[in-house]
Amino acid sequence: MILERIKSEVGKAVVGMDEIVELMTISLIAEGHILLEGIPGIAKTTLSKNFANTLGLKFVRIQMTPDILPADILGHTFYDMKTGDFKLRKGPIFANVVLVDEINRASPKTQSALLEAMEERQVTIEGITLKLPEPFIVIATRNPVELEGVYNLPAAQVDRFMMKIDLTYLDEKQEKLMLRRKSLGKFSTARQVVPSSEILNAKREFRKVHVSDAIIDYIYSIVKETRLDERVILGASPRAGEHLLYGARVHAYLEGRSYVIPDDVKKLALPVLAHRIIVKPEYEIDNITGKEIVMDVLDRVEVPTE
């Protein structure tokens, strides 16, 4: 299986990331993007780079700063004095796996340009439209601790990310294993184990996975219920339902099934929906988050049996 090969190889470079690797693989195949949130030093860059290595994909890391401009990411034209012509220089966005570190440090103008490229999967430089390479995924990181010198992502931009994944500390067993392997020098860089052509084929094949009317109704009911919850200002968008549908189909495909079951939807509901939900301030005080809303919705919505 594609997923098992990727997990096994990435496991040579990082510890305790199997669940994250699975979500990254699903998002890549479903043509989605990921928002990674976590404190510094928990291997976000190492994970992303080795994930790209397992697929033989070009990896680029872009460190966001307040003074970075859209042209620094997308590219620009320049005058070549030798030839007397204007030439095009592509930016770092022209890679397969693009890690955008600390996206909230960039100005709104730069954030907007990046997110537009993510949505359109192409960029326009001086009137020239260029397609981004395939497969293509942006993995943006956000540090929840740093609050100074940052620009919060508007809800409309957060909604463009198919998934938001929270990276936390490893548990005791995993962290001790990590330290032990570091001590013995048993970490290595992942190598390619899945040809990129196999991922491109998966992008075509997952769309053949059957989705019954009952599953469509189930997804819609979940999304609708997030909007009706009295604790919510803004529920899940129609795009969220679309992402949940695609994610469920890819999960079914990776499991070797030709049809989607409710468990596929449940598996993806939290990472796909929770970050899109805005909770009313009076409930935020009680530590109610989008995750709690989604979990309550999953408990309330009737699961199809057919």
Image (cartoon, rainbow, N blue to C red):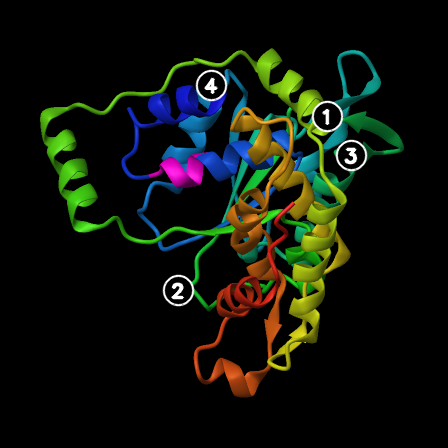
Mark drawn on residue 1: 4
Of the numbered discs 1 and 4, the one sitting upstream in the chain is: 4
> Which residue is the site of mark 3?
123
> Which residue is the site of mark 1?
208
In the rendered view, would you say 268 is above or below 291? above
Q: Main secondary structure of the magenta part?
A: helix
Q: In the picture, residue 252 is in which quadrant?
A: top right
Q: Residues within 10 Å of mark 2 (few under 14, many from 20)?
A: few
Distance CA(mark 3)–CA(mark 1): 29 Å
Distance CA(mark 4)–CA(mark 2): 38 Å
For mark 1, give the secondary structure: helix
> Which residue is at 68% across, 50% downward?
160
Type of amino acid under label 3:
Val
Type of amino acid under label 1:
Lys
Of the numbered discs 3 and 4, the one sitting upstream in the chain is: 4
Q: In the picture, residue 78 is in which quadrant?
A: top right
Q: Nearer the viewer, mark 3 or mark 1?
A: 1
Distance CA(mark 1)–CA(mark 2): 42 Å
Q: Where are the magenta residues, as a range?
A: 17-21
In the foreground, 82 or 255: 255
Horizontally, is 111 left or right of 24 in the view? Answer: right
Distance CA(mark 3)–CA(mark 4): 34 Å
Of the numbered discs 3 and 2, the one sitting upstream in the chain is: 3
For mark 4, give the secondary structure: loop
Type of amino acid under label 2:
Val
In the rendered view, would you say 197 is above or below 142? above
